[in-house]
Amino acid sequence: MATNTSNVTAALLKPMKATSNGAFQRENPLDYALPLLILQICLVVAFTRTLAFLLKPLRQPRVIAEIIGGILLGPSALGRSERFLHTVFPPKSMTVLDTVANIGLLFFLFLVGLELDIRSIRRTGKKSLAIAGAGITLPFLLGIGTSFVLRSTISKGSAHAPFLVFMGVSLSITAFPVLARILAELKLLTTDVGRIAMSAAAVNDVVAWILLALAIALSGSNTSPLISLWVLLCGVGFVVFSVYVIRPLLELMARRSPDGEPVKEIYICITLSLVLASSFVTDSIGIHALFGAFVVGILVPKDSPFPGVLIEKIEDLVAGLFLPLYFASSGLKTNVATISGAQSWGLLVLVIATACFGKIIGTMFVSRMFFKVPFREAAALGFLMNTKGLVELIVLNIGKDRKASTHVHCLAS
């Protein structure tokens, strides 16, 4: 019996070969990494695009369809069929799928950084800064309060400090990329409400990523505070290095790419290589590979055609093929069926209510009380600042991988 079990375990752990010799050679292509990955990509993209088409009358952004599609492909719905799950998404294929999805995620965070202009944040008025502050502070405090309830019920084994920060960040962050697309679709980018929301969301994003870096530094497997301090110091050192070494290189390439002339291919190659190299450095430090990509994106000069060309080159590939894979990968780890019983549903309602209440009420209160913004505009700002999307899912997945929010992942997703 023990021998049979060890044989099955060895078969599951055995790495997959890349390509098959074909069905005519009596080989199943789905037993090989490349054809299986191609099938997974095609299935995920077709499924999520179909959902996006069906949700279009409801004016929902595509990211909503991709999140729902990822959950439906997992054990919550289609994945309930063991035959489907072990044929299309077998456990031995998940390393390849997760790796490809995370490479796409790196470049997505790079694109997010490209869309964030630090100079516009510096020019942000008191109104936007105050709204951003309220949009972070109240949900963060409520998230910490919620974390005490969760730790006393379903997350008793979670590390205290990282769990508090992960919960606070996941409930207080605003999905800047999703907000930008919603405002663009509704033609609100040039309105006062749109400009304030974008500025406040940009400040919110930067602060939240700093807090997330702190949470990751605290959540290492080594509980020594000295290790966490070294991680933080090395992270700061990386940012300083990026500002004084990487940014001048990016500025040089931007200056040599004047408007009206094509950007040299070597510049695109260097920039994308910098994204990967920076991701490697931050992952080696122990923060997360995503931070390196995000920092490089922020440092690209925004006053030249260079960032526009970069977006044009990679956005369709990243958003069209790689991001749906990340949602599928997350959905395969999420089983909504585990939310059962009065306690689980009560905690789910608590998390949702806390996330929405803190953002909307905090933003509306500051807008009305301190800046006399009309009620309708203040309410619009509150709901816009409550935009959720991929970034929150990234935070929860990082927390889950770091074992800081394992039991909350399904609730908050």
Image: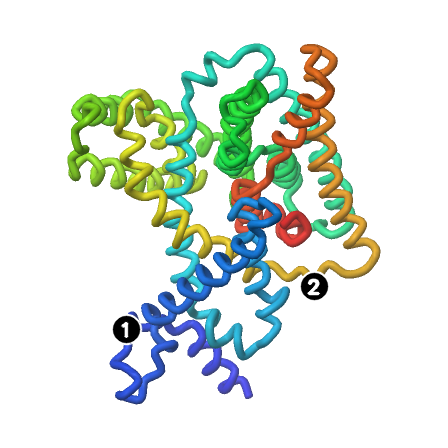
**Residue 19's mark?**
1
How far apart, in angstroms, are the residues tagged by discs 2 and 1? Answer: 36 Å
Say which quadrant the N terminus sits in. Answer: bottom right
Against 169, is 159 above or below? below
**As rendered, which of 155 and 271 lies closer to the eye?**
271
What residue is rendered at 27% in x and 23% in y?
304
Against 147, is 26 above or below? below
Q: Secondary structure at mark 2?
A: helix
Picture quadrant where residue 215 is located? top right
Name the residue carrying label 2: 337
- Which of pointers 2 and 1 lies earlier in the amino acid sequence? 1
Residue 211 is left or right of residue 259, and the answer is right
What residue is rendered at 25% in x and 81% in y?
21
**As rendered, which of 314 and 172 lies closer to the eye?**
314
The disc labelled 1 sits on which kind of residue? Thr
**As rendered, which of 233 and 225 lies closer to the eye?**
233
Residue 402 appears in view: no
**As rendered, which of 160 and 300 lies closer to the eye?**
300
Give the image location of residue 373, x and y in percent. Answer: 68, 15
